[in-house]
Amino acid sequence: MTPNSSGADQIDTLLWIGFVAATIVIVAIVGALLYALRRFRAERGAEPRQLTGDRRVQLRVGGALAAFATVLMVAGIVFTEKAREAPASGPAGLHNDGETLRIVATGQQWLWRYEYPNEAFSYYKLVVPVDTAVELSLVSTDVVHSWDVPSLAGKADAVPGKTNRVAFSAEETGTYFGQSATLSGQAYPAMRTEVEVVPAEDYEAFVEQRKSDIEAAQERVVGLIESGETP
Amino acid sequence: MSAPSKRPELAFEGWTPRRPRWVEIATSADHKDLGRALIVSSLGFLFVALIELLLMRLQLAIPENTFLSPVGFNRMLSLYGATSVFLFALPLALGLFYYVTPLQIGARGTALPRLGQLGFWLYVAGATVLYAGLLFTPSEAGVNPLAPLSELTFLANNGVDAWAAATGLATLGFVLLAIDLVATLRVLRAPGMAWRRLPVFSWAAAISSWLLLFIGPVMLAALTMLLIDRNFEGIFFAGGAGGAPLLWQHLSWIFFTGAYMLVLIFALGAIAEIVSSMSRKPLFNRGAVIGSLIAIAVLGTLAWMQNMLTAPIGVGWMYFAMIVSLALIVPFGLVFFNLIATLVGGTLRMRAPLLFAAGALATIAIGLASELSHSLVALAWRLQDTTDATAATHFSLAGGAVFGGFAALHWWFPKMTGRTMGETLARFSFWTMVLGMLLAFVPLFLAGGFEGQPADAYKFFDGTGVSGYNLLSSIGAFVLAIGIVMTLANALLSREGGAPAGHDPWGGDSLEWFALSPPQPHNFDVLPDVRGPRPLRDIRTAIGQRAARQPEPARESQPVA
């Protein structure tokens, strides 16, 4: 998995920070434990010194732990804020006066529905222009789903009755996969999605095509009903 | 031929029961009988949970497997979650607390024995309801059934009702046991047993019980609301009709996070006893360890939103969850530091309890270290609900409840049965479990952390880069299960066939080792005057000094064997 937006990039950096911090903790504790267990074995007749504690040592260790925790807190906040930064559209992006492209993503058992600004919609596959700030409004019509395309953004839950937001600006064209990570019933593993990042003009052509296709289909249905061919 | 010992080893043969044995057990309100019943049934449910885990891992051994149906898998998952938390981990911790605490504080029983008895039987009722669900339809809603999936609209059969009733009955039972423990610890401490002299395991019992008094009612309220939603057209957690699905998440995570901390507090408390006795030293910085356990209970439970970092809750709350979670580094770090510092300079006897205690410390460290990275807000947007989170939870909780629980079991088994558990089998079991643990869950860290495999899914797809990890994990689960079954078998075999232990096989410092093994119904004939945090050691020292002052009379007249 390679990050393809600045937000995903920050999360990737944070992943390595978390990985290193966790490794330090594990190595320190397991190492000290193994050392103590191997070094201090029982000897006949030996009575160990009955040390009950040392306030100075305790304060120093506590201080060191607090410093470690503070460093992680600062790193967590700094990179979370960077990851949350509103993405900006670049020169190759969609020309809509620097406005964010707002798309509604509706989770439903077990398919994502994407609604574009011109009222065109698509299922399963989301098409977005490259180098353009995109904001997804995540809603759900039934149970909790999570929208998670790690190459583009962090995951977020679509909870019925609430609106959650995910924003990203894809750096390169391509197809990116994602899957929900919240148990949503029998077909939960099928709750996947695909994001196709295309050049801006292809995106515009796509949504226009979808819109006219949908209108044509609706007109045909209306026509069938009016003509009495369909009850 | 050694001189006759100062305190002859008395073997308690039991009193003659007036009624059949099963009636005695079923009607007993004695803390030792109930504690043992809780421990035995929780270990039985550990075995059941293992079978459920293995069935799920068989399904997940290869991509797009069809061994279990989707519904079948979700039912296994729900049963596994409820069994391992409500029927194994919590009752095991409470059972050991309930058995050991009155002995440690020099009490002749608990303060409210009938309440504790009711608590145990409510737990039994909960377990019965959960598994009676197998006769019709168990829950399909997962380990923590998030609303609105758990609502009637989406799961119309009675599975979730059975789940909610079962966990509710068990939780109510735990709360009653906690009330009994709190009362016992307040009013029945032996003369001189001030709070500052209370053994660390009893402190852990006190902290855990108080914690349960807070989180138990929260869960009971949430379960009641869920049952009202499902059966009386309520809308507490309904998605559309003005309900708040997130409310369920808040309430249930308060309980589950608190329970998580309870398991760790139990394990660390038991390990503290084992580590100090086995190295023949006092616990290093006792006060700091106890203070840290209190801080873990408070901060740990306050960190409940660490599980909700992808939910729409506002970034300020996310930072709150992160800061509280990372603040836990200080108390957890101090406990680990002091436990290891206790070993340093000691004279260690590497018997099974110490081995399992060390294993528990290492596995808990791995679990908590990965939880630490899950607390970084933006990183949680990557890792939450992936198999990375599954692995972290299992390292912490299996580290606490299985490794820590087994350490405590090996430690107090001689007290409960009068016999020690087999050392050789314990060693084989331990190393098999370590291998199984690493093999089962380290690959899940990698699959979740680097490939983003979602947790709790009944299948994964070929070509997503996680097939190898999952196969390894399935193999590891079987190795782990073999290791655990070895210890369960060891306990069964040693109950009758273990080496006789005597009243104090480990050279313990606290008062439970003053009682006979197994203790008499009234625990103690006489109570010593407690003058410090290590009363039994004080007694040993006093006996030694007296012997030094008054040389023993010459023994010519005694027969030579």
Image (spheres, rainbow, N blue to C red):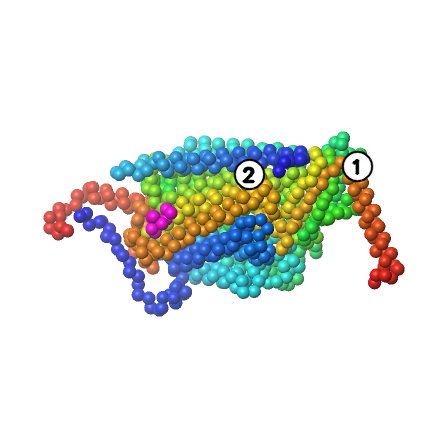
Q: Residue B414, can we see it?
A: yes
- Tell me what residue is drawn at x 48 percent, y 59 percent: B123
* Vertical placement of residue B268 versus A133, above or below: below
Q: Residue A51, can we see it?
A: no
Percent across and percent down for residue B264 are 47, 46
- Residue B373: give its label: 2
Q: Is residue A79 magenta?
A: no
- Residue A201: give its label: 1
Q: Nearer the viewer, residue A228 or A71?
A: A228
* Vertical placement of residue B19 versus B225, above or below: below
For disc 2, the neighbor class at 10 Å (few under 14, some 14 to 19, many from 20) is many
Considering every residue shown, the one lying at the far right of the view is: A227
- Tell me what residue is drawn at x 45 percent, y 33 percent: A61
Mark 1 belongs to which amino acid? Glu
Percent across and percent down for residue A108 are 69, 52
Q: Nearer the viewer, residue A220 or B105?
A: A220
Q: Which chain does the numbered disc 2 sit on? A: B
For disc 1, the neighbor class at 10 Å (few under 14, some 14 to 19, many from 20) is some
Query: From the viewer's perspective, is B432 left or right of B257?
Result: left
Q: Is residue B427 magenta?
A: yes
* Vertical placement of residue A229 versus A106, above or below: below
Q: Which chain does the numbered disc 1 sit on? A: A
Q: Nearer the viewer, residue B551 or B79?
A: B79
Query: From the viewer's perspective, is B502 left or right of B338?
Result: left
Q: Which residues are magenta?
A: B421-428
- Tell me what residue is drawn at x 69 percent, y 44 percent: A194
Quadrant in the rendering for residue A226: bottom right
* Vertical placement of residue B381 versus B33, above or below: above
Query: What is the CA distance from the residue labelled 2 to the residue labelled 1?
Result: 41 Å
Percent across and percent down for residue B504 are 30, 49
